[in-house]
Amino acid sequence: MPSALSSPLLLQPPITAPTLNLSPLLPLRTLATRRRIATRPFSPFAVPIRATVAIEKETPENERPETFLRSSDDVLSSSSSSSPLSVRARFEKMIRETQDEVCAAIEVADGGGSFKEDVWSRPGGGGGISRVLQDGAVWEKAGVNVSVVYGVMPPEAYRAAKGDVGGNSGAKAGPVPFFAAGISSVLHPKNPFAPTLHFNYRYFETDAPKDAPGAPRQWWFGGGTDLTPAYIFEEDVKHFHTVQKQACDKFDPSFYPRFKKWCDDYFFIKHRGERRGLGGIFFDDLNDYDQEMLLGFSTECSKSVIRAYMPIIERRKDTPFTEEHKAWQQLRRGRYVEFNLVYDRGTTFGLKTGGRIESILVSLPLTARWEYDHKPEEGSEEWKLLDACINPKEWI
Amino acid sequence: MPSALSSPLLLQPPITAPTLNLSPLLPLRTLATRRRIATRPFSPFAVPIRATVAIEKETPENERPETFLRSSDDVLSSSSSSSPLSVRARFEKMIRETQDEVCAAIEVADGGGSFKEDVWSRPGGGGGISRVLQDGAVWEKAGVNVSVVYGVMPPEAYRAAKGDVGGNSGAKAGPVPFFAAGISSVLHPKNPFAPTLHFNYRYFETDAPKDAPGAPRQWWFGGGTDLTPAYIFEEDVKHFHTVQKQACDKFDPSFYPRFKKWCDDYFFIKHRGERRGLGGIFFDDLNDYDQEMLLGFSTECSKSVIRAYMPIIERRKDTPFTEEHKAWQQLRRGRYVEFNLVYDRGTTFGLKTGGRIESILVSLPLTARWEYDHKPEEGSEEWKLLDACINPKEWI
């Protein structure tokens, strides 16, 4: 088993549809040194690009560094900015602050458990901090991970991002360096009336290729926050979606309806014909707005997590429940496992390409259950949840 | 959610390496009427053949028919046989007898639970019997399914089986009818010292294509029996492998070493670098021996299941255990889920092509567990099991 520490990757190579989303909790590995996978498709989703990114191997650290950025990145970037710090630097600062705030809020609300931390870095720059609270008083498993990754992607990926697929301008182009940073978190409570939360925000940049001077640098944002309860409390779901809408509306009135639908579409367990939960917002490849505006939007979404989730936890964490309630929660946890192992692109990509398994699979619940042919009684609370997962609703 | 009943498929189209194994617990659906998947690969494994089989939709039945065969199949087949019944008929008889015997033995040993039965058929012939015992005294989930399937495969698949890939002899050939029958079972006990058992035996035939008179009919056998304990009792594992070897040695001394290794290779959780259990035997595409001999071999293996497994259950089902023992069993059940959802070809194919989910996923345990970065203490009983999953041993 791999002994080196790793952390989630939260990036996506800049390719066109069908997109390859390297979403929550995917660590990068030294693919180039471990295994060549460039000659075969690594997943059913990866149609256009068969090569993949190459990253150095990670090493454990005893202390958190002030930054995981290369020193050259700590200054003003070439993109438009009113800040003395690059977008890379400000995004890293934001996700690390968010990690601290979310972990602190969880420890306070849990009242029992505390986070175990793993810090790691890579020789050429980049690294991450993985934090996991397991078997606490309120949460059975809570993971909050940040990572900063410097890697190299094949030139085809870069050309596809520029809309230059099949063109000959890049015939001699070499691999394109990229930068990715992100925060990713899954929080599974014990009480069956307290919902699971997932959130993930990521920023991605490619460097201008050295052998194509003047070629544009690409960047984009991705992420989302979604709620997965086993039982519906309308006021909880309304509150959660309202906070997401408020964060969206500060930037663009089209964001909430668009990203709400994107979320319902993404977290779809196709073989069940149902979503894993009650959604929230999800977006990816976002670069057709002002970069500063999208940095502000990602920050607003990240900073809204505590306000969206913690009031629900406070209301539900001590609700009395029966064995039947717990069994239903466990069945829904089984669905969570099915989505993550079968569909989540970050997870399936990570498993197939040799990522650090414990970091990838920290998103799985502590416990899950599968009953043969379980069908909730029509009209029951369990049936209502299932119905809302099959037929997504407008909550606000 | 689909309401019609289905059952495991246990067949494999006759393609060359990399093979497509439609292994345990995969129900077929009316792929042709539901969705066209012929133009894209349905899984990373399905390299040579992009089209797939087409099967009629199943309907529930109130009673078990005497046979699921078409009446024309009930007589002497065209292949060499000393019996008045076709190989198809004798194989169906054998798997249904095995299902009855195994279910009876399990109910007796369980002493509490009983099997729930679902019978189904298809209008053009074929059908199946699914039996599940859930939350019994000894087993938390035990599924024993038989099925008989008549379907149609693309001509490319048939030509590949004949070694005629790219040839023009079949340029005008139409779809090739096929027949498949099999038994598939996964038995998950409650006691952490009592092992999980999986077995699956299947027989496959293609008809001679109507538009290519004289073209040979293809047939082959596949299957295996493997043991997945959470703790190693050497006498149990030796007994289990000895029974497998005895069954093999009655037919060919090369079978046991060859099929033992095949089993270790197939049930490999690549992202963990470990097998899901302690193996047994596994084989597929077997047609380079006398057909009667292989029918006898599959029968011998199927009839050996009770002798291989039940003495172990009797010894371990009432062993006292701690919460820690149970938690370790649950972690290993998590590995079972990972193998089945990520790697098992039958499961992943079935999920992606619209099979009946409850039949496919009856192989999953009732409960499973994932702890972050769990590492058994070196030298502990848990560590010994993990070591044997990482480094397969010769048990006899």
Image: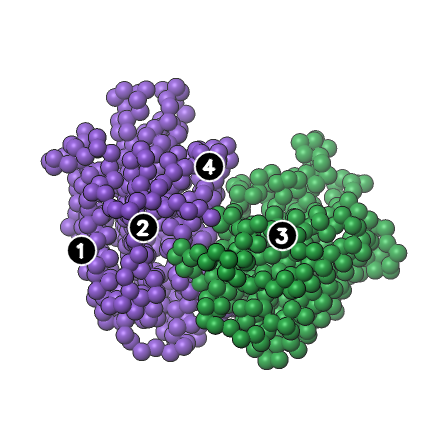
Chain colours: A purple, B green
The reply to whether residue B326 is visible in this rendering is yes
As shown in the figure, which amino acid type bears the numbered disc 3?
A: Lys
User: Residue B305 sits in which quadrant?
Assistant: bottom right
As shown in the figure, which amino acid type bears the numbered disc 4?
A: Arg
The reply to whether residue B220 is visible in this rendering is no
Label 4: state its secondary structure.
helix
In the picture provided, is B263 more to the left or to the right than A111?
Answer: right
- Within 10 Å of the Cα at label 1, are there few (<14), some (14-19), or many (20+) other Cα atoms? some
Which residue, given by chain and number where applicable, does mark 1 sit on? A246
- Disc 4: host chain: A
Q: Residue furthest right?
A: B82
- Within 10 Å of the Cα at label 3, are there few (<14), some (14-19), or many (20+) other Cα atoms? few
As shown in the figure, which amino acid type bears the numbered disc 1?
A: Gln
Label 1: state its secondary structure.
helix
The C terminus of chain B - image quarter: bottom right
Q: Which residue is at the front of the view, B94 or A378?
A: B94
Whichever of labels 2 and 1 marks the residue nearer the N terminus, that label is 2
- Residue at x 32% of width, y 50% of height: A118
Question: On residue A34, which mark appears?
Answer: 4
Whichever of labels 1 and 4 marks the residue nearer the N terminus, that label is 4
Q: Which residue is at the front of the view, A102 or A276?
A: A102
Alpha carbon distance from label 1 to label 3? 59 Å
- Disc 2: host chain: A
Question: On residue A118, which mark appears?
Answer: 2
- Residue at x 36% of width, y 31% of height: A152
Question: On residue B393, which mark appears?
Answer: 3
Residue B235 screen position, x and y as percent: 66, 64
- Disc 1: host chain: A
Identify whether B223 is placed above or below B362. Answer: above
